[in-house]
Image (tube, grey):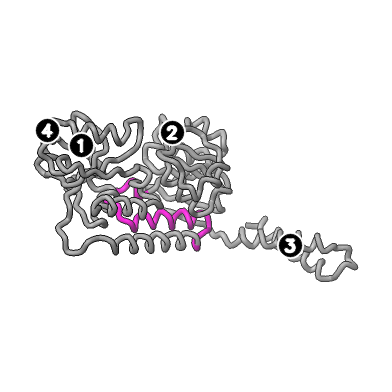
Amino acid sequence: MKNLHRKLIIGMLLLLMAACGNSEGVTATEEKDETDSVETLQHEEAYKEVEIENIENVLVFSEVPKRAVSLNQHVTEVMLALGLEESMVGTAYLDDEILPIYKEAYEKIAVLSDQYPSQEVLLAQEPDFVYAGWESAFREDNIGTVEQLSQFGINAYLHESSKIVGPSIEHIYQDIRNISKIFNVNDKGEELINEMQKELTTIQTRIPKNEEPLRVFVYDNGEAAPFTVGQNFLNEIVTMAGAENIFNDIDSNWGEVSWEAVVDRDPEVIVIIDYGETTAEEKKNLLLNHPGLTDVTAIKDEHFIVMPLSAAAEGIRVPHALEILVEGLYK
């Protein structure tokens, strides 16, 4: 703090010298440089210490992070939507193509790995902030735990809406606000949230009124037993679309169920999550050819919706996810 005061005093003295005119030997160019210097110092002083509660940790920031790394697509796109690419020294783990609007900015950032980088690769970038979308990033066999990274002087933030059970759209907005606060771009954060809200409101006007909610089964993967959505954000999106997730009684975000339970609940629509090495078409064929699903309404009607994981995750693509569901449900 003493150093900052000293710098401000020096800056004010320089301005006073400039005000005395060129008789003191100060040129117009020097005057501009001195003014810019003072403005920079004032901006630094404006950044008050920021405390963010993140899951079970409290992160403290005394300045805006300058060497951030993002892991997982949905949080990378949050950073880019807030215009923070200049503060990023690395990124990793896409599930899909980056949104076209952010492609140019994304290509300026070093890609550290196709999936999670090792801790050694991460530390080589000398990051001061790591932002992960999924809890799996902070395992010891990936980049290390939050506590381990803290020992290296790195603040590590986990996207809360991807961690908590039963997240709502407000939880996503809170993540955006937290990142905006950390990087001192609060206005941009609110602007992004307002844009998302407007898009969601517009899409919801196309949902039929007073109709019985369509029964939806979300298929992620699995042959012996299906892995499906319980309480994660896709459950919220299905509800927003005027439909009902048939496994919304599972008390976790994801869960394994039986094929018999799928038959008993007889979905009218199947949403296939598209990611990884198994294509959406291969998943669809598995379901269509499963002998136990022959009498399921969605199978008989071949009513499928393909949802990219990049849209299903808790990020800025929420309006896109709702658009996909509304178009597919009411075609």
Disc 1 target residue: 256
Closer to the N terminus: mark 3 or mark 1?
3
Badge 4 marks a residue whose secondary structure is helix
Query: Magenta segment, which residues?
Result: 160-187
Disc 4 target residue: 292
Please say if the residues under marks 2 and 4 sit with CB atoms less than 8 Å apart: no
Please state the total of marks drawn on the protein image: 4
Disc 3 target residue: 11
Q: Which residue is nearer to you in this view: 199 or 36?
A: 199
Disc 2 target residue: 115
Q: Does residue 165 show up?
A: no
- As shown in the figure, which amino acid type bears the numbered disc 3? Gly
Badge 2 marks a residue whose secondary structure is loop
Inter-mark Cα distance, 2 to 4: 35 Å
- As shown in the figure, which amino acid type bears the numbered disc 2? Gln
Inter-mark Cα distance, 1 to 4: 17 Å
Could you tell me which residue is drawn at 48 percent across and 45 percent down?
155
Was residue 24 drawn as part of the magenta stretch in this picture? no
Local packing at callout 2 (Cα closer than 10 Å; few below 14, some 14-19, many 20+) is: some
Was residue 178 drawn as part of the magenta stretch in this picture? yes
Could you tell me residue 44's position as x and y percent? Answer: 61, 58
Could you tell me residue 21's position as x and y percent? Answer: 85, 69
Could you tell me which residue is drawn at 25 percent across and 36 percent down?
284
Please say if the residues under marks 1 and 4 sit with CB atoms less than 8 Å apart: no
